[in-house]
Image (spheres, rainbow, N blue to C red):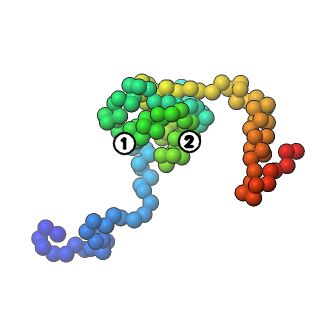
């Protein structure tokens, strides 16, 4: 302490330079999005399969963005889905949705929302399932295609 006495309690056990261990505070996502939970004015969440890619303008202003926004724009040099971004950056899905919408509004990201009719097409799902079944397992054995 300032008066020369050793500190009391929990701080006395911590060594200088040692970071506290434990879960991150639950408030952080709320702070990152400034308390917003809806990513757009409509209040509808951006679909997780929405593809986002950085614009040339977004890449030129990377240093002026917040930490999380910087990471999102930098990771979007190639198109990625909202779900991929959340997993890659280890951010909550809704945080990425809100920040991606902010970055789109600012002109730093281009957003490609999938056509709803295509995503509901059963033939697309069937082709995905067939493609997954065509991948051999860890033993090199193909799954039954039935």
Number of marks: 2
Q: Earlier in the sequence, mark 2 or mark 1?
A: 1
Q: Nearer the viewer, residue 128 or 68?
A: 128
Estimate the x, y position of residue 121 in percent, counting from the top left: 76, 29
Question: Is 42 placed above or below 127 here?
Answer: above
Q: Helix, strand or loop at disc 2?
A: helix
| Residue pictured at 25% horizontal, 68% vertical | 16
Estimate the x, y position of residue 115 in percent, counting from the top left: 66, 24
Residue extending furthest toward the left: 3
Q: Nearer the viewer, residue 121 or 38?
A: 121
Q: Please name the residue that numbered disc 2 is placed on.
A: 84
Q: Residues within 10 Å of mark 2 (few under 14, many from 20)?
A: some
Q: Quadrant of residue 138?
A: bottom right
Q: Please name the residue that numbered disc 1 is placed on.
A: 67
Estimate the x, y position of residue 31 in percent, counting from the top left: 39, 43
| Left-right relation of 104 to 121 | left
Can residue 82 be seen here?
yes
Q: CA distance from mark 2 to mark 1?
A: 18 Å
| Left-right relation of 64 to 117 | left
| Residue pictured at 41% horizontal, 25% vertical | 56
Question: Is 101 placed above or below 15 here?
Answer: above
Residue extending furthest toward the front: 140
Question: Which quarter of the figure is the C terminus placed in?
Answer: top right
Question: Is 61 placed above or below 28 here?
Answer: above
Estimate the x, y position of residue 8 in percent, counting from the top left: 25, 74
């Amino acid at each position: 302490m300032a008066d020369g006495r050793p500190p009391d309690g929990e701080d006395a056990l911590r060594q200088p330079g040692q970071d506290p261990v434990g879960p991150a505070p639950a408030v952080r996502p709320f702070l990152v999005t400034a308390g917003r939970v809806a990513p757009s004015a409509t209040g509808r969440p951006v679909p997780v399969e929405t593809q986002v890619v950085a614009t040339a303008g977004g890449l030129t202003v990377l240093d002026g963005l917040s930490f999380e926004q910087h990471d999102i724009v930098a990771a979007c040099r190639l198109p990625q889905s909202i779900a991929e971004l959340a997993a890659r950056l280890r951010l909550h899905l809704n945080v990425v949705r809100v920040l991606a919408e902010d970055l789109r509004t600012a002109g730093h990201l281009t957003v490609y929302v999938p056509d709803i009719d295509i995503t509901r097409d059963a033939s697309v799902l069937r082709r995905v399932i067939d493609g997954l079944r065509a991948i051999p397992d860890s033993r090199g054995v193909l799954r039954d295609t039935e």
